[in-house]
Amino acid sequence: MSSKMSMKEKLFNLSVSNIVSNAVNIGNRLNLFSKLAEISSEKNPVLPEQLAEAAGCKERYVREWMNCMACGEIIEVNEEEKFWIKEENVEDLANNGFEVVSNGMIAPLLEPADDLIECFKKDGPYGLEYSQFSKFQSFMGVMSKALHEKHVIPDMIPAIGHGISEKLESGGIRVLDVGCGGGFHSSLLAERYPKSHFVGLDIGSDAIQQAKERRLKSGEPFNNLEFIQCDAGKMPEIWTDSFDLVLIFDACHDQCRPDLCIQEIHRVLKPNGVFAMVEVLGSSNVFTDKATMGPLAAMMYGCSMFHCLPVGSNCQSALCMGAMWGRKRAVELLNKCGFKEVQIVDTPFFPINLMYCSQKI
Ligand SMILES: C[S@@+](CC[C@H](N)C(=O)[O-])C[C@H]1O[C@@H](n2cnc3c(N)ncnc32)[C@H](O)[C@@H]1O
């Protein structure tokens, strides 16, 4: 956003973007972009009733949505009130990628907004429960797919090093996915590496329920994949020295006690076992983040404020990290919890992440 704009203009533009963004989310969820791309072009623009028919929706609602999208400069309109998507925009609007899916982020995060306001107050509660975000797990599944699906196997796994790709392939190794949510990553890995065994762990019953349903619905036998509901800060005693690889995908910073989780990961890894933690980009300094990450920094500090911080602050002893805890704080905590040598691996194929890798010596 141009810094020459007055504050009034900035605020007005923000409120417009907010509405248009949420309308983009509605359209994406109803597949209106992909249907419009299918049935229209600049040479063959269509009426709302045609899109409504193709998408199985009511014409009047679709017309209002198209009007908003056209005035918001997302799709095109002509004087006859016929619409199309510019050819060069089809891929971005209709591919379910991070940029379009992220327009669905704010709706599930706003659900407990009134309670969040109470958390800010000195005498208010410490934080929020995961269960106060009833649509979070399903949205996170969609988001993780958009962010990670294409790159976990070909790019991220080789980037861990330590011969992990080969070991997963040849099999017989045990892998733990901490804070697995709906099980997106564990399922992807279990399918690709059928000779290795995967355990997904999450504190949330809805997360584990969803993970188990995902496995059932997949039609795959997934004999190499199990899910367990458990606090990452207190894993089963019998797991000591039992995993070859522990992974975390965006699930350390939002724990109340990430220190206990990392100590437990150190305990359950076999000697020479490897820990790879995919976390949100960040430097641990907001000035640097603003300069280096631009608008993505605003997005991630905002998501943190709405969700990661309040769920990770929800007890007296919480470390209250927030999503933008960043490299410095993450490495300090990893060192303090037993991982003395930490490699920070850039993961440019993941738009919002980097990866911390370490071996249990
Ligand atoms: C942001 S979500 C990430 C989910 C998943 N890894 C993904 O990327 O789709 C964070 C997950 O951490 C889980 N979590 C939070 N605190 C936890 C704890 N103490 N022990 C285990 N899981 C925890 C939450 O229930 C949630 O599913």
Image (tube, rainbow, N blue to C red):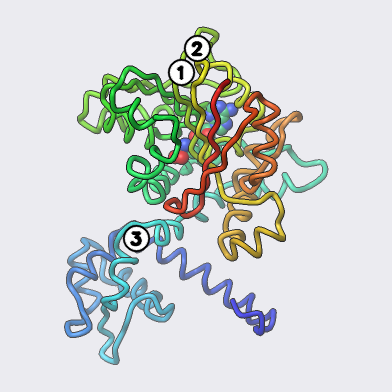
- Residue at the bottom extreme, as displayed: 79
Instruction: Determine if residue 204 is in view.
Output: no
Residue at the spot of label 1: 243
Label 1 to label 2: alpha-carbon separation: 8 Å
The residue nearer to you, when weighing 23 against 168, is 168
Residue at the spot of label 2: 239
- Residue 28's disc number: 3
Residue 279, quarter of picture: top right
Amino acid tagged 2 = Trp
Q: Say few, some or many: other residues with alpha carbon within 10 Å of mark 1 (under 14 / 14 to 19 / 20 or more).
A: many
- Marks 1,2: beta carbons within 8 A: yes
Q: Nearer the viewer, mark 2 or mark 3?
A: 2
Kindly state the secondary structure of the residue where label 3 is placed. helix
Amino acid tagged 3 = Asn
The residue nearer to you, when weighing 27 against 357, is 357
Image quarter in which the N terminus is found: bottom right
Image quarter in which the C terminus is found: top right
